Amino acid sequence: MRIRLLGTGAGGGVPQWNCNCKVCREARAGAGRVRPRTQSCVAVTADDRRWFLLNASPDIRAQIEGFPPLHPPAGVNRGSPVEGVLLTNADLDHTLGLFLLREGDRLRVHATAAVRRSLTEGLSLTGTLEAFCGLEWIQPPADAGPLACRDGSKSGLLYRAFAVAGSPPRFMRDRVEASDGGTVGYLLRDERTGGRLLFLPDVGRIDDALARLLPECDVLLFDGTFWSEHEMQERGAGHHPASHMGHLPISGAGGSLKVLAETKVKSRIYIHINNTNPILLEDSPERAAVTAAACGIGWDGMEISL
């Protein structure tokens, strides 16, 4: 399995267009203290030919153009090696890219019923895309099953989805309650090599079921949105705590870093990192704490092979 981190920032990317926080200022300065990041999206393949996207970032066009294996195949006027999109939830930073893929063939989108409802009722995604490329919804399996390509052939990957704690998308909070299936993670396994990827860009808390699942992978891509619970307020960038937004902070006694540091996984990498998060500063004590715990910090263009 080849894994390409197309984007590793949270909503708005780094720097965010209207943000003048310390991290965004350093990213704009280009002095090397902060790598610019596009919004979170990952591409995976088992054969270097047929690719699947894990979420569809609003920056998807630039991400595709910046990675030649996702360009149209040689010898065709139009086409794409992207076989489908696996959604973890209905948040805008994970789904707006679907609208940008409307010029292609019929989109195959793997999503739970709760995610489909939010996107259909809240964003009119289904009706809009039916007027362009068309849309095929696929219910991801709870038990490992083949991840099929557009023509029905096997991709060489097995996958399953599992519910994790999260929050409804902001545009649906007055219409739906947080429920199983509103936010999911994915476990993907390469049928040939046995390599396993656990994809978790949104985690509200680590319960017993998730704690048992974490060691069942070789690479863990985990929610690194916020360093602290009240980060947005402290940076003057918002009013909501991390937990209200469906994200477990990295730091603190109940934070993810303590759990990940004690989890026996070959690679533990934070992704979906908000522009206010001090781990983005290469020389910050917060980044040093992550590194000391043998965890990594994802960056756009990072690749991993399993």
Image (cartoon, rainbow, N blue to C red):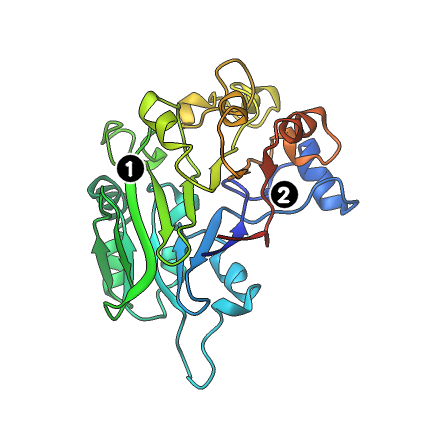
**Which residue sits at x=36%, y=33%?**
170
Q: Is residue 217 above or below residue 230?
A: below
| Quadrant assignment, res 163 | top left
Residue 168 location, x and y as percent? Answer: 31, 32
**Which residue sits at x=24%, y=48%?**
140
Q: Is residue 273 above or below residue 233?
A: below
Locate the N terminus by quadrant: bottom left
Answer few, some or many: residues within 10 Å of disc 2's Cα (few below 14, many 20 plus, some between 14 and 19): many
Q: Is residue 86 above or below residue 182?
A: below
The residue at which mark 2 appears reads as 15
Depth check: 224 or 16 in front?
224
Residue type marked 2: Pro
The alpha-carbon separation of the residues under discs 1 and 2 comes to 32 Å
Depth check: 93 or 40 in front?
40
**Cβ atoms under marks 1 and 2 closer than 8 Å:** no
**Can you name the residue that lies furthest to the right here?**
31
Residue type marked 1: Phe
Answer few, some or many: residues within 10 Å of disc 1's Cα (few below 14, many 20 plus, some between 14 and 19): many
Q: In this rendering, would 181 be left or right of 276? A: left
Image mark for residue 162? 1
Q: Secondary structure at mark 2?
A: loop
Q: Is residue 147 above or below residue 208?
A: below
Residue 171 location, x and y as percent? Answer: 33, 36
**Which residue sits at x=59%, y=54%?**
301
Residue 11 location, x and y as percent? Answer: 49, 41
Residue 46 location, x and y as percent? Answer: 41, 61
Q: In this rendering, would 105 be left or right of 39? A: left
